[in-house]
Image (spheres, rainbow, N blue to C red):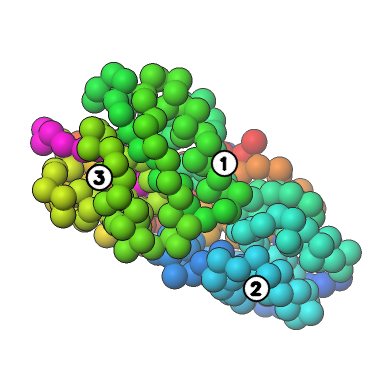
Amino acid sequence: MSLVKQTVTAACIVTLTLGLTACAAGDNSGGGTEIGYSSPVLAQEAQQDTVFGLEAAAGQLGWKTKIYDAGLSPDTQASNIQTMIDRRVSAIGAWSLDSGAVGGVYSSAGAAGIPVVGLNSDGTGVVSSVWWAANRCDPGGPLEQLATMFGAAKPGMKIIVMGGPAVPSIRANTACFIAAARMVGLDIIASQDNSQDTSANAAVLAQDLLTAHPDVEGFWSYNDASALGISSAISSSGKTVASGSTAGIMVTGINGDAAAIDAVRQGRMTATIDANSVASGWATAVAIRDAMEGKPNKTYVVGATIVDSTTIGNYIPPRERTYSIDTLPVEIR
């Protein structure tokens, strides 16, 4: 699938959003509305793009935003949420690192009349959730498509799975891919978590895995940073990454980070899932608006596409795509 510039009206494909309810905490008339967002780790490019989209949409709606960075710490995230409550924001959006750790403060937000919308997360106190299609285990979804891609390249391919930190959405994503891989007959010969969430650590882990499993034919990674580290380790070991007609070890990631797109273009990565992160920020604002109007939806799914050597020519950088409150690649369920 190619990632082309697309605008889909909310009447056709429903919009992904973050819920904001009319309540005592905030004024939903425009200028008095301030929304808060807790990023799990703002150092990641996809998170920066999500915030970019959220702030652009908020500006169109006349809202103010306050962004917090949890830095992969559930305790910091819980503290940030409490700060938002004390600040009396009109609504809270958050990608939960640990639903148990934030369940209490989410409930406190609800008691204060402040709705909470989860991005790639749900749980106690969350009124609705915005999901990347890349983080859903839907039949025929991007994760299943990647598994099929590996299987089409070589039936029974020997692959290694690299997961990440103990974040619920990452754990679920990894489990979903493993199930899809087994369904198409892939041979998962090893799995390893990149708990440090860095390319450098992924490279070290991948080097050890390549030594232990010299017959590996593919790597699936939970994000692009890890995939880039894996690619570096493959090159350092004297092997080749598969790309287009070039044979080698397949390497795939998720997020559609700029460095990963360049790597796909240059043949250093086989594919990445573009999560449409800027659209996710826009969708979050729409969900907030829906909740403010007293009609929050349970689930908003933002479309994703696979970028590889066959589709890279149609790729448009996330911040160059055209969005508006009423035109987003999102489905409401």
Determine the image quadrant of residue 146. Answer: top left
Q: How much space separates mark 2 and mark 3, taking CA atoms? A: 38 Å
Q: Which residue is mark 2?
A: 76
Q: Residue flagged by tag 3: what amino acid is it?
A: Thr
At a point 70% along the width and 55% down the height, the residue shown is 99
Residue 123 appears in the picture as rendered:
yes
Count of picture labels: 3
Where, by quadrant of the figure, is residue 88 drawn?
bottom right
Q: From the image, tell me which residue sits under label 1.
A: 172
Question: Vertically, is 291 above or below 32?
Answer: above
Residue 302 lies in the magenta stretch: no
Residue at the extreme front: 212
Q: Is residue 101 above or below residue 148?
A: below
- CB within 8 Å, label 3 to label 1: no
Relative image position of residue 21 (x, y in whole percent): 77, 60
Image position of 144 (left or right of 155) = right
Q: Secondary structure at mark 1?
A: helix
As drawn, is 167 to the left or to the right of 257?
Answer: right
Give the label on residue 159, or none.
none
Q: How far apart in space, not on screen, are marks 3 and 1 (Cα)?
A: 28 Å
Q: Secondary structure at mark 3?
A: helix
Residue receiving disc 3: 211
Which residue range is magenta in the image?
Answer: 245-254
> Which quadrant of the view contains residue 333?
top right
